[in-house]
């Protein structure tokens, strides 16, 4: 399910206020909130995006590319539990 517009705008505002540079999104669906997050981050910002369904992500990928923020996103096609365990255990 997509994030409502007002929630995406609120999240974007919070990221800017925090001067966030690194974020993680678990379950990206078509990438609407991922796009909003990428737009809110500085040019050197990084997002780790984890989802099993690459087809849904690829639906929104043209919009991410058109916005010029694809370089900020590290998409990992996997079960988030596995990736999170790997990150925790180094």
Image (cartoon, rainbow, N blue to C red):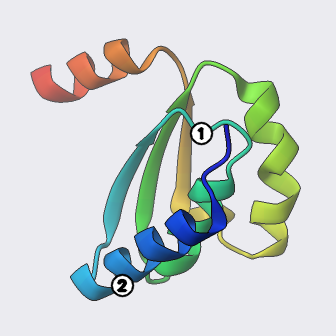
Query: Dot 1: what SS?
Result: loop
Q: Residue at x 67, y 46 (%)?
A: 2
Whole-percent x, y for residue 86 in the image: 25, 20
- Secondary structure category for the residue under label 2: helix
Pick the quarter of the image with the C terminus: top left
Question: Which residue does the numbered mark 2 point to in the structure image?
Answer: 16
Q: Looking at this view, is 59 or 89 the one in front?
A: 59
- Could you tell me which residue is drawn at 32 percent across and 62 percent down? 22
- Can see residue 29? yes
Question: Is 41 left, or right, of 16 in this rendering?
Answer: right
* Figure quadrant of residue 87: top left
Residue for badge 1: 28
Q: Position of residue 52 (x, y in %)?
A: 60, 18
- How much space separates mark 2 and mark 1, taking CA atoms? 20 Å
Q: Is residue 87 left or right of residue 11?
A: left
At which x and y percent is residue 67?
A: 76, 76
Q: Of callouts 2 and 1, which one flags the residue occurring earlier in the amino acid sequence?
A: 2
Question: Residue at position x 58%, y 56% from top?
Answer: 34
Q: Is residue 17 above or below residue 1?
A: below
Checking the image for residue 20, the label placed there is none
Q: Along the line of sight, which residue is nearer the eye, 18 or 82?
A: 18
| Residue at 34% in and 12% down | 82
Answer left or right for 28 relative to 65: left
Classify the position of the N terminus by image quarter.
Answer: top right
Q: How busy is the neighbourhood of tag 2: few (under 14 within 10 Å), some, or many (20 plus)?
A: some
Tell me residue 61's x, y (percent): 80, 51
Q: Is residue 89 above or below residue 29?
A: above
**66 relative to 35 in the view: left or right:** right
Q: Please say whether residue 38 is visible from this viewpoint.
A: no
């Amino acid at each position: 399910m997509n994030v409502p517009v007002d929630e995406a705008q609120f999240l974007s505002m919070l990221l800017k206020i925090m001067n966030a540079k690194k974020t993680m999104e678990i379950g990206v669906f078509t990438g609407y909130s991922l796009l909003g997050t990428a737009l809110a981050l500085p040019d050197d910002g990084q997002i780790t995006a984890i989802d099993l369904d690459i087809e849904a992500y690829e639906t929104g990928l043209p919009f991410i590319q058109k916005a010029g923020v694809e370089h900020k996103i590290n998409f990992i096609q996997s079960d988030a539990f596995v990736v999170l365990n790997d990150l925790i255990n180094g």
